[in-house]
Amino acid sequence: MHVRGLGLPDETEVRLWIVDGRISLEPVAGADTVFDGGWILPGLVDAHCHVGLGHHGETELDEAIVQAENERDVGALLLRDCGAPTDTRSLDDRDDLPRIIRAGRHLARPKRYQKGFAVELDDESQLPVAVAEEAKRGDGWIKLVGDWIDRSIGDLAPLWSDDVLAAAIDTAHAHGVRVTAHVFSEDALPGLIKAGIDCIEHGTGLTDDTIALMLDHGTALVPTLINTIENFLGIADGAKRYPTYAAHLRDLHARCHGRIAAAREAGVPVYAGTDAGSMIKHGRIADEVEALKGIGMSPTEALGAACWDARRWLGRPSLDHGASADLLCYSTDPRQGPGVLNQPDLVILRGNVFRP
Ligand SMILES: [Zn+2]
């Protein structure tokens, strides 16, 4: 089959042929034209979601499949799974589901993350060994819980000492995998960034100093804006026994737009992730793209953060000759907003056409 339209970000003509599930940039005789005019994009990327994670942790595989289908139907064809307790490896055999880049299971300490989500290490010195173990389960990423409420002090606090983080991140890099961490507060950031972490998730507690550290170390940021904006106040309201923690969350919520905007303005690479899989429903990447416009990204940059730029960062191809034919066709400019971006005219995954 054959498709023709405008590519982004350059707005130049794209002509692709699809043969045996792969893209050909060279004409193929006798191909059916299935789309002509409009815009053609590589499949969208949700750079922070969870397939096989529900409100209480592990899910049935059937539920994980529905989560992945919901992502596919809105055009999210490459998912960076930021930690899941369910083994979803068998989903890789299915031609109809998005590609998943896994980060193994979350690594945390007892009572220092949501119950049922993480591998909980009794002693922090176990972290490097646990990292080596999760490196085998994942697809090139490790997920740490960087901070969480410490009920003994009633506030957010780091889970790991700086030297343990340095050893754990060195171990991950020696295994050829990158590391990211859940971080809400200010205090956990310096230790993680100085230890050479590759990415920060959420990052609501960024300061000018930690933004400068991220620039020095080349650290990326996936702010999951829709999750923090929609959920922090509700979490604070539910934390009546921990008023310091609740006040801290409210303060982070009030300032996070400005802090994430400052990080982007300074030059920290920012990518789109929804955090779907517990409080956020799957299939909302278009809402995150819209939210990224609110931190100063142009419509093209915000879309790139969920598409071609994210693919490059994750080491996955876009509309390249020989790449898997994972692409989207839109008759209307997908930069217009979620109403368009969410509803591709065609979703083509591994060369198979889906019409949502
Ligand atoms: Zn998450």
Image: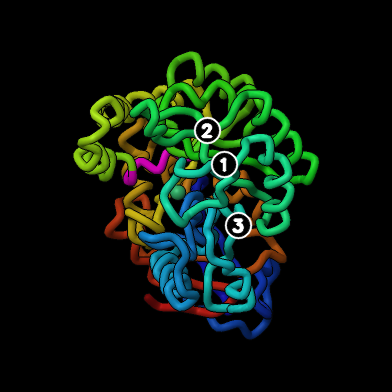
Q: Residue shown at 32%/45% (left/top)?
A: 226
Image-quadrant location for residue 293: top left
The magenta segment = 222-227
How many discs appear?
3
Please tell me whether mark 3 sits on a helix, a strand or a loop.
Answer: strand
Q: Which residue is mark 2?
A: 159
Q: Is residue 344 above or below residue 201?
A: below
Q: Which residue is mark 3?
A: 102
Task: Compute the Cα span from label 2 to label 3.
Answer: 22 Å
Task: Say which of 116 and 182 sits in front.
Answer: 116
Looking at the image, can residue 42 be seen? Answer: no
Q: Residue shown at 55%/21% (left/top)?
A: 190
Q: Quadrant of the C terminus?
A: bottom left
Q: Are marks 2 and 1 in contact (CB under 8 Å)?
A: yes
Q: Position of residue 80 (x, y in %)?
A: 55, 54
Q: Amino acid at mark 3?
A: Arg
